[in-house]
Image: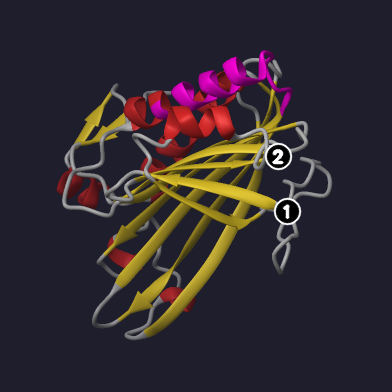
């Protein structure tokens, strides 16, 4: 399967995260050395409610885990001055978000990946040991100012044909990905018909890394699935609009 790239993709946010066995105090008294490393490039520091643990990936049960209401734990946010990059740290999680907050183009996956690799390396060095990764997650959120029938392949069922109103749907599947022992993907679509029209297309993969000390390999595999899934579910006419280029990084 070929990789795919778009010169001007509609990516609105990318999230790459690693969940590991909990480390007590990581987002409080043990975070000082990380603060010293991160705060210069990420000067906007705040505290947020802790995210709930990712549910175990059970292929028989399926579904992505959802928990309502905040937990009592602590999560630290380190944002760049323009808020484009966000590093999230809590007792069992490290995540990097890229967000379209400026007119600058999406910097491509290798740069976002390098950001995660850098802060993961900092965490390993500060702890003096590699955390035991038990799940990874990759999410791409695409925001497209067009109605779904002009964006999504096969969106011509009579149930989907309307002049105005909103829509929302999610599709989940078990996956077999290199460098993982289990994986599950979700493709979620939502938005509105009429004026102004909008299609939100969110693709998420969660996976258990084959090697607990090398979670980045599993994230690479998750990202590869996402960009090819994005290509498969979107129309070739908008591919031309976004400037499709095969065999490249996305």
The residue singled out by tag 1 in the image is: 73
Snapshot quadrant of residue 147: bottom left
- In the visual, does 150 lie left or right of 125? left
Estimate how packed mark 1 is, as few (under 14), some (14 to 19) or many (20 or more) residues with alpha carbons within 10 Å. some
Is residue 182 found left or right of 31 in the rendered image?
right
Indicate which disc, 2 or 1, sits on the residue closer to the N terminus: 1
Please indicate, yes or no, whether residue 178 appears anywhere in the rendered image.
Answer: no
Image position, residue 103 (x, y; %): 16, 52
Circle 2 sits on which residue?
91
Q: Which residues are magenta?
A: 115-133
Front-most of residues 231 and 24: 24
Provide the secondary structure element on which disc 1 rests: loop
Which residue extends farthest bottom?
A: 164
Q: Quadrant of the C terminus?
A: top left
Placement of 214 over or under 41, stated as above or below: above
Q: Are marks 2 and 1 in contact (CB under 8 Å)?
A: yes
């Amino acid at each position: 399967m070929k990789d795919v790239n778009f010169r001007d993709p509609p990516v609105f946010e990318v999230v790459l995260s690693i969940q590991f066995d909990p480390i007590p105090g990581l987002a409080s008294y043990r975070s000082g050395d990380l603060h010293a490393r991160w705060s210069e490039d990420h000067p906007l520091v705040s505290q947020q409610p802790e995210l709930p643990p990712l549910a175990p990936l059970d292929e028989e049960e399926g579904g992505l885990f959802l928990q309502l209401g905040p937990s009592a734990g602590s999560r630290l946010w380190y944002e760049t001055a323009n808020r484009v990059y966000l590093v999230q740290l809590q007792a069992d999680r490290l995540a990097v978000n890229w967000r379209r907050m400026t007119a600058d183009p999406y910097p491509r996956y290798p740069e976002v990946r390098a950001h995660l690799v850098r802060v993961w390396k900092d965490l390993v060095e500060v702890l003096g040991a590699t955390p035991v990764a038990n799940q990874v997650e990759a999410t791409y959120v695409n925001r497209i100012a067009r109605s779904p029938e002009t964006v999504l392949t096969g969106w011509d069922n009579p149930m989907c044909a309307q002049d105005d109103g909103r829509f929302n749907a999610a599709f989940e599947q078990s996956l077999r990905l290199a460098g993982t022992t289990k994986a599950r993907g979700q493709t979620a679509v939502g938005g509105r018909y009429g004026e102004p029209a909008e299609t939100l297309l969110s693709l998420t993969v969660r996976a258990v890394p084959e090697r607990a000390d090398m979670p980045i390999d599993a994230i690479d595999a998750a990202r590869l699935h996402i960009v090819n899934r994005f290509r498969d579910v979107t129309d070739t006419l908008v591919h031309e609009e976004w400037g499709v280029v095969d065999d490249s990084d996305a």
